[in-house]
Image (cartoon, rainbow, N blue to C red):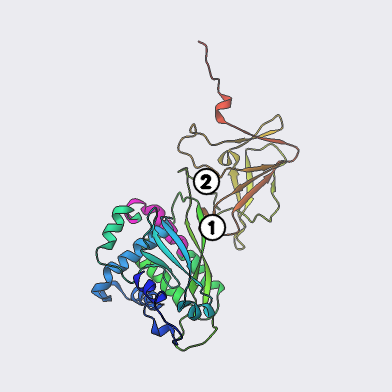
């Protein structure tokens, strides 16, 4: 932070300035990427704590424990970076603090500032405990999602994708990614990631690519019901563009066909798993969440419109799936209403 301030407040005047004239413009981003490519035992001793600090900052970013402040670039940085699509810098600090300790990076998502001092990590952890120790399951799940998004981006992009491959390998080596059995909801963030590194000057070649990153969202701690296919184990949620599944007759279950092209299995889902009850009097009851339900997985809170009940899952609860996140059911000629489970019990019993 000090180096940046020194440069932008210096009297550069009319001097000709190139990126290589300014230490730390992108060099530290490339340095972290280069170090992460190496196996742990081959890395310089002086980088070990820096890499641990990087892991801590990335963990806090995924757990939404960092404050991010965008600042427009000033000269001499602006004229150098703007042709490549960069016009601002994003400082990061621990939540509820003001001092920047890192920066959003176009190569490794987030990194410490160049003036990182040995021992800083232990001081940071006293302010916000390391998620690796205090939220291991949630952290592992969101690293798993990050790897999945990078992997999907590889399949969609063309050309050199070595940076994304390096990041996937580094995330698998430095963390313990795995899908959570009870994943929380999440919030979508968009970052810019360098597509490739050029070793020759090429004015106007913008290689920054937008990438989606999921960070943890607010959660009430309830376990979420996520129906899966009995054959391929894929989630049974569908695109919102599909017509709702019709349930014309009284039933205690519904058939949902797996949308995977190579599967097509018909799966039977009990309506009780969705907290739905079809009554003989023509009503459909949608039970509200209640503490009276013990040790069960709750479906998402439904949206009810006319005779259609819609369930929507967060992408973070479905392995990062962006589109197939819905189940919609139509109950023709039936009235749908929500009830609390307590309404079916007597409030007083006379004996």
Res 259 label: none
**Residue at disc 2, secondary structure:** loop
Q: Is residue 334 rendered to the left or right of residue 110?
A: right
Front in this rendered view, residue 143 or 271: 143
Asked if marks 1 and 2 touch (Cβ < 8 Å), the reply is no
The mark closer to the camera, 1 or 2, is 2
> Residue 348, image x and y in percent?
53, 16
Q: Is residue 210 rendered to the left or right of residue 331?
A: left
| Crowd band around label 1 with a 10 angstrom C-alpha radius: few (<14), some (14–19), many (20+) | few
**Location of residue 325 with respect to 304 vertically, above or below:** below
Q: Which residue occupies 53% across, 49% down?
A: 226
Which residue position is annotated with label 2?
A: 225
Res 232 label: 1
Mark 1 → mark 2, Cα distance in angstroms:
18 Å
Q: Residue 171 is drawn in which quadrant?
A: bottom left
Front in this rendered view, residue 162 or 225: 162
| Crowd band around label 2 with a 10 angstrom C-alpha radius: few (<14), some (14–19), many (20+) | some
Front in this rendered view, residue 91 or 161: 91
How many marks are shown on the rendered structure? 2
> Residue 206, image x and y in percent?
54, 79
Q: Is residue 284 rendered to the left or right of residue 141?
A: right
**Residue at disc 1, secondary structure:** loop
Q: Quadrant of the N terminus?
A: bottom left
In primary-sequence order, the first of circles 1 and 2 is: 2
Q: Residue 141 is drawn in which quadrant?
A: bottom left
* Chief SS of the magenta region: helix
Please provide the residue range marked out in magenta: 132-146
Q: Which residue occupies 31% across, 68% down?
A: 51
> Residue 5, image x and y in percent?
38, 71
**Location of residue 38 with respect to 248 vertically, above or below:** below
Is residue 133 part of the magenta span, yes or no? Answer: yes
């Amino acid at each position: 932070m000090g180096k940046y301030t020194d440069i932008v407040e210096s009297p550069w005047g009319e001097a000709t300035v190139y990126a290589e004239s300014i230490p730390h413009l992108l060099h530290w981003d490339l340095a972290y990427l280069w170090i992460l490519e190496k196996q742990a035992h081959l890395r310089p001793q002086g980088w070990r704590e820096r890499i641990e600090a990087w892991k801590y900052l990335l963990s806090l970013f995924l757990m939404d424990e960092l404050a991010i402040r965008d600042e427009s670039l000033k000269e001499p940085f602006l004229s150098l970076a703007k042709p490549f699509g960069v016009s601002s810098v994003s400082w990061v600090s621990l939540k509820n603090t003001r001092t920047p300790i890192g920066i959003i990076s176009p190569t490794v998502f987030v990194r410490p500032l160049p003036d990182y001092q040995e021992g800083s990590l232990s001081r940071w952890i006293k302010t916000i405990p390391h998620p690796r120790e205090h939220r291991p399951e949630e952290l592992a799940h969101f690293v798993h999602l990050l790897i999945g998004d990078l992997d999907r981006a590889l399949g969609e992009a063309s050309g050199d994708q070595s940076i994304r491959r390096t990041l996937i390998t580094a995330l698998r080596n430095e963390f313990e990614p795995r899908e959570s059995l009870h994943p929380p909801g999440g919030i979508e963030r968009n970052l810019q990631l360098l597509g490739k590194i050029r070793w020759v000057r090429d004015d106007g070649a913008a290689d920054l690519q937008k990438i989606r990153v999921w960070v943890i969202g607010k959660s009430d701690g309830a376990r979420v019901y996520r129906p899966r296919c009995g054959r391929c184990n894929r989630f049974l949620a569908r695109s919102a563009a599909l017509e709702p599944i019709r349930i014309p007759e009284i039933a205690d279950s519904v058939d949902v066909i797996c949308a995977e092209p190579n599967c097509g299995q018909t799966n039977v889902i009990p309506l009780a798993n969705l907290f739905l009850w079809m009554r003989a009097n023509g009503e459909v009851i949608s039970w509200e969440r209640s503490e009276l339900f013990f040790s069960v997985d709750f479906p998402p809170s439904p949206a009810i419109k006319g005779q259609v009940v819609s369930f929507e899952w967060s992408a973070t609860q479905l392995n990062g799936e962006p589109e197939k996140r819905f189940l919609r059911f139509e109950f023709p000629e039936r009235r749908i209403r929500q009830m609390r489970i307590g309404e079916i019990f007597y409030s007083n019993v006379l004996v």
